[in-house]
């Protein structure tokens, strides 16, 4: 099966090249290629997972060059499991994006820019998960980040350019730190292969090893949005369209968590950074959930819950016991799915209600009961309501913390319980104000969050359209996001079936962890 290892990276890269050559012509063929390639990647990922579970880790030296010279790809149970879930999520998000783009009569920009760029991002994610050496992991990160730079600024509106600039600067800084850590380890050990590093790092002087560990943890912490390295996230993600925000929130931060798991279990398993990680986990939980409580925009609220729940995963990584790491992996898989789902459903809320501002929403439980149900299930899942997977993952982390028994670990357990309750409170606030109460009176746009992404997908509103709509338009005086203009009426009239179907598929995947999570837990 090791011959399959390059396919999750090569298939999206080749498909992206084909789609760039085709350009905007043959839109149906373009969409078919995207879905078919992502489905093939999912099938390959499932085959790799089954083989890794049955026969052990699969290893391939690209081009026949052995380590440390050659590129090593590895599919063990962790990387293959992450690849399966990420492939399923990216496939559902692509279906959602196709439905949204088709319904909004935008056939040019998504086909010529969004689709190939999205496939490049998928290739980078797969490469990061399958990398058997640090430099190849860095390359995977960079492929993913270069694609994300395009996706986060699509449309060219002022808020997206502003948010994209912040995002790019932070991402470049973390990439430079990652490269510095790789250079330190290579200079000290003569290799960047993870398996060889796990043997050679133990022989390094303690100071050299500690410097490499702290720099590597900082780089991964920025990518995972661990507090205090997370303040860029709530201002960057909400400005992008729903499919882009969803895949960013679901996958990009989890790749940082995956890097933390590899670093702390394989390279530096000596617990030197334990207290630092525990404090960072606690601060992430507290700051994230407090930020969520004061938000009046659904996108920003969910973005702050993302920061908060990264703390749960860092908590498990810091404990490093078998029980804690098992619960962490389970929680990562759960969070990839549920966070992506919430952002996709938020896109449905915006489409049906015309806004993501809680001050302007209301009555959706009556006017759009299906959207209410689609929001309620993942919201309760994220809040940790039993017996949903969010509760099972948190319960596993709580048990691991209690078994550890240290003062910081026990404090983290108490903090995590309170954070879970406050998360539930914040999401119930969204439900009460957006779905349960009477419809809010119409009013003028209320800023960047009100109509973020409300314009036709990935395309800015023209000044003329903005003028006809009575708003400032992109870069106007109010500094708001794309004004919906004349297109809002047809957008709120119906929900495209692919958008609803993709959201339902992700909800089903998330719920399946309750039933099928036993094997992954073991």
Image (tube, rainbow, N blue to C red):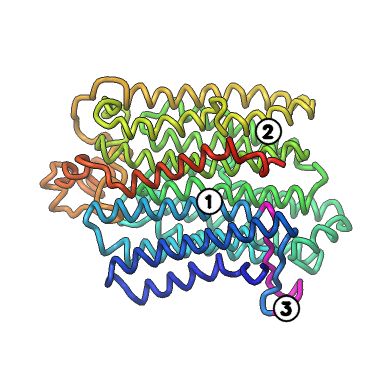
Lower position in the chain sequence, tag 1 or tag 3: 3
Question: Disc 2 or 1, which lies upstream in sequence?
Answer: 1
Res. 236 in view: no
Q: In which quarter of the image is residue 406?
A: top right
Q: Is residue 75 magenta?
A: yes
**In the rendered view of the protein, which quadrant contains the N terminus?**
bottom right
Q: Pinpoint residue 190: horizontal percent, then vertical percent.
A: 80, 69
**Which is in the foreground here, disc 2 or disc 1?**
1
Q: Where is residue 176 in the image (x, y as percent from the top left)?
A: 60, 60
Which quadrant: the C terminus? top right
Residue, x 74% and y 65% (percent of image)? 192
Q: Is mark 1 on a helix, strand or loop?
A: helix
Q: Name the residue under label 2.
A: 279
**Under tag 2, what secondary structure?**
helix
Q: Identify the residue at image location x=30%, y=47%.
A: 497
Q: 120 left or right of 137? A: left
What residue does disc 3 label?
65
Highlighted range, magenta = 64-78
Check if residue 154 falls in the magenta segment: no
Give the x, y percent position of residue 467. 13, 47
Q: How far apart are marks 2 and 1 (CA)?
A: 22 Å
Q: Is residue 223 visible?
A: yes
From this viewpoint, which residue is outermost toward the left? 468
Measure how far apart labels 3 and 2 are at the Cα level: 42 Å
Residue named by callout 1: 252
């Amino acid at each position: 099966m090791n011959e399959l290892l390059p396919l999750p990276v090569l298939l999206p890269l080749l498909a992206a090249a084909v789609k760039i050559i085709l350009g905007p012509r043959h839109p149906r063929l373009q969409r078919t290629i995207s879905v078919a390639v992502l489905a093939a990647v999912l099938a390959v990922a499932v085959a790799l997972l089954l083989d890794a579970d049955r026969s052990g880790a699969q290893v391939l030296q690209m081009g026949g060059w052995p380590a440390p010279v050659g590129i090593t790809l590895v599919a063990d149970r962790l990387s293959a499991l992450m690849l399966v879930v990420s492939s399923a999520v990216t496939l559902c998000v692509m279906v959602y994006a196709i439905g949204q783009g088709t319904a909004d009569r935008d056939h040019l920009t998504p086909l010529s820019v969004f689709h190939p760029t999205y496939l490049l991002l998928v290739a980078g994610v797969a490469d990061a998960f399958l990398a058997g050496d640090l430099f190849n992991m860095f390359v995977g990160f960079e492929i993913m980040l270069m694609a994300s730079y395009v996706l986060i600024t699509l449309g060219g509106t002022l808020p997206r350019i502003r948010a994209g600039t912040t995002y790019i600067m932070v991402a470049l800084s973390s990439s430079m730190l990652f490269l510095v850590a790789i250079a330190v380890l290579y200079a000290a050990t003569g290799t960047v292969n993870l398996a060889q590093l796990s043997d050679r790092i133990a022989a390094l002087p303690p100071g050299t090893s500690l410097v490499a560990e702290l720099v590597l943890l900082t780089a991964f912490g920025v990518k995972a949005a661990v507090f205090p390295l997370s303040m860029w996230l709530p201002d960057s993600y909400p400005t992008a369209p729903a499919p882009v925000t969803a895949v960013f929130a679901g996958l990009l931060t989890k790749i940082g968590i995956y890097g933390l798991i590899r670093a702390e279990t394989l390279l530096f398993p000596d617990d030197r950074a334990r207290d630092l990680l525990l404090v960072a986990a606690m601060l992430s939980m507290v700051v994230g959930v407090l930020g969520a409580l004061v938000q009046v925009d659904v996108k920003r609220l969910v973005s702050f819950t993302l920061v908060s729940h990264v703390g749960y995963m860092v908590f498990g990584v810091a404990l490093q016991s078998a029980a804690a790491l098992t619960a962490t992996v389970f929680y990562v898989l759960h969070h990839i799915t549920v966070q992506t789902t919430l952002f996709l459903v938020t896109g449905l809320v915006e489409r049906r209600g015309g806004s993501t501002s809680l001050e302007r929403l209301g009555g959706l439980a009556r006017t759009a009961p299906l959207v209410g149900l689609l929001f309620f299930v993942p919201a309760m899942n994220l809040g940790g309501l039993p017996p949903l997977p969010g509760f099972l993952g948190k319960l596993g982390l709580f048990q691991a913390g209690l078994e550890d028994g240290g003062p910081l670990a026990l404090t983290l357990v108490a903090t995590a319980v309170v954070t879970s309750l406050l998360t539930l409170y914040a999401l119930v606030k969204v439900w009460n104000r957006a779905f349960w109460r009477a419809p809010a009176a119409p009013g003028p746009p209320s800023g960047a969050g009100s109509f973020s992404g409300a314009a036709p997908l990935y395309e800015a509103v023209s000044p003329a359209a903005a003028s006809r709509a009575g708003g400032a338009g992109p870069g106007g005086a109010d500094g708001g996001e794309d004004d919906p203009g004349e297109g809002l009426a047809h957008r709120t009239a119906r929900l495209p079936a692919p958008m609803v179907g993709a959201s339902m598929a992700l909800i089903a995947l998330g719920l399946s962890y309750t039933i099928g999570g036993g094997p992954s837990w073991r």
